[in-house]
Amino acid sequence: MAIESWLARAAAAFPDRIAVEDLERALSYAQLLDAARRIGGWLHKQGVGAGSWVGIPALPGVEFAAALHGVLLAGCVAVPIDPRWSAAERGRVEERLAAILELERPAQGEPLSEPFTYDPDSPALVIHTSGTTGLPRPVVLTYGNLLYNALGSAVALGLDRGERWLCALPVSHVGGLTILTRSAIYATTAVLHPRFDTDLAYAALEEQGCTLVSLVAVTLERLLDNGWEHPRTVRVALTGGGPVPATLVARARAAGIPLSLTYGLTQACSQVATEPLAALGGGLRPLFCTEVATSKEGEILVKGKTVAPGEIGPDGWLHTGDRGTVTADGCLVVEGRLADTIISGGENVSPTEVEEALLAHPAVKEAGAFGLPDSRWGEAVWAVVVTAGEQAPTAEELRDHCRTLLAPFKVPKGIAVVPGPLPRTASGKLLRRNLADLVADGVR
């Protein structure tokens, strides 16, 4: 089965509708298709064949969108190049590329002729994982993965024909990049910001008619701190990219934010389980055409049309490396990374649960929990916190607070108060492997 190019289809149906805009300019679907056809034509002129990997500097804007669609129209595979990579990381990626596009000087060639079709099983994108547990590695996503991701997201969140989806996430990551592909499939508008800026995001959400936004916990908190409440046009604030503290969720919902929590990963083309718009607050439900289960060790397993073919294990499942449970009514509860689980005195301790307890203290702004080797316990639960306000609580006060919320074996043996912010990936995930470095030797 061939898939008609979603960009060509959108341009034929809605040529004058805005396809993508950034802070400086906007392109209609007709204009985006024209630019993409010329970039695709240039690639063919250079002898870059179908299936070749083509690098695109991951700088959010209309130029990136045109380059992305141009690579796809040419039958090539788009590979976003993260500008934050080191020279060594970039070199390892570039040695596999047939070409690299320059966004400052858009490629111009004889426009590709129509029709454009895609094989659902053919590679479309290569996204490098954010590397919370090691070096980034490539994940190959197909056209079918992208199409079913868009379908599953629309079933969960609904679809507004006037959708304006704000993307202030890196387009080198799956959460940001799939906003562009979904919007093209829906023939709606993607609004790209070069990075998250609280004032610019607030203006887009309150003054520029954005209807949907993708956030992580840190950016949601910044918007709330800026006074965001009872938005006029926003249908859904999709929030994930890592654990979202219960206190922050409660605060957002008290402010009238239509918050939909989501869990996903690159290997499953972004969303895996999401709170449906019709039942916000009711728990994470697997996306349409997606199956979720857990192993006997508690690992979250995923199966379905959004899973990258190369990531499927011998048993037919994607092994996520995340710990969780599936409730009797089919909701997914995510408990953190398996590798982050602290085994203290033979008991499993979820660092996410410890962090939630610390964040419930009114003076704690950020918290990270981790295990340190201990001769008595095997691993001892430790935590670092960033406090808010002038009167910072002592470590013992924070431990007393945790005792009211946690079983004794989960209470941190030590807590260090640090200036912050805590180390995170570009997508907002806490880098727990770096937390021990923040604990001074004298404090240990």
Image (tube, rainbow, N blue to C red):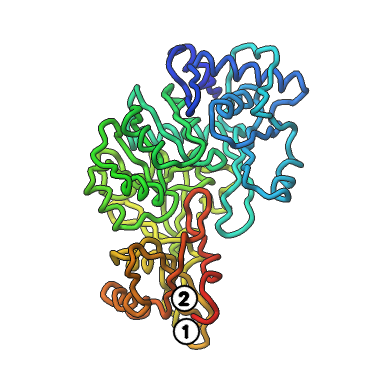
Alpha-carbon span between mark 2 and mark 1? 8 Å
Image-based side of 210 in relation to 19, left or right: left
Q: Is residue 407 visible?
A: no
Residue 277 x %, y %: 28, 38
Name which residue type carries label 2: Ile
Q: Quadrant of residue 386?
A: bottom left
Q: Which mark is residue 343?
A: 2
Viewer-nearest residue: 32 or 103? 103
Q: Which mark is residue 98?
A: none
Please tell me which residue is depicted at 53% across the width and 80% down the height of the picture. 373
Residue 2 x %, y %: 56, 22
Please tell me how crowded label 2 is: few (under 14), some (14-19), or many (20+) other residues with Cα within 10 Å: some
Viewer-nearest residue: 8 or 100? 100
Residue 296 position (above or below residue 373)? above
Chain-order first, disc 2 or disc 1: 2
Determine the residue located farthest toward the front in the rendered image: 390
Name which residue type carries label 1: Trp
For numbered disc 1, what is the local secondary structure?
loop
Disc 2 + disc 1, Cβ < 8 Å: no
Residue 154 position (above or below residue 297)? above
To which residue does mark 1 refer? 377
Q: Is residue 245 visible?
A: yes
Residue 118 position (above or below residue 11)? below
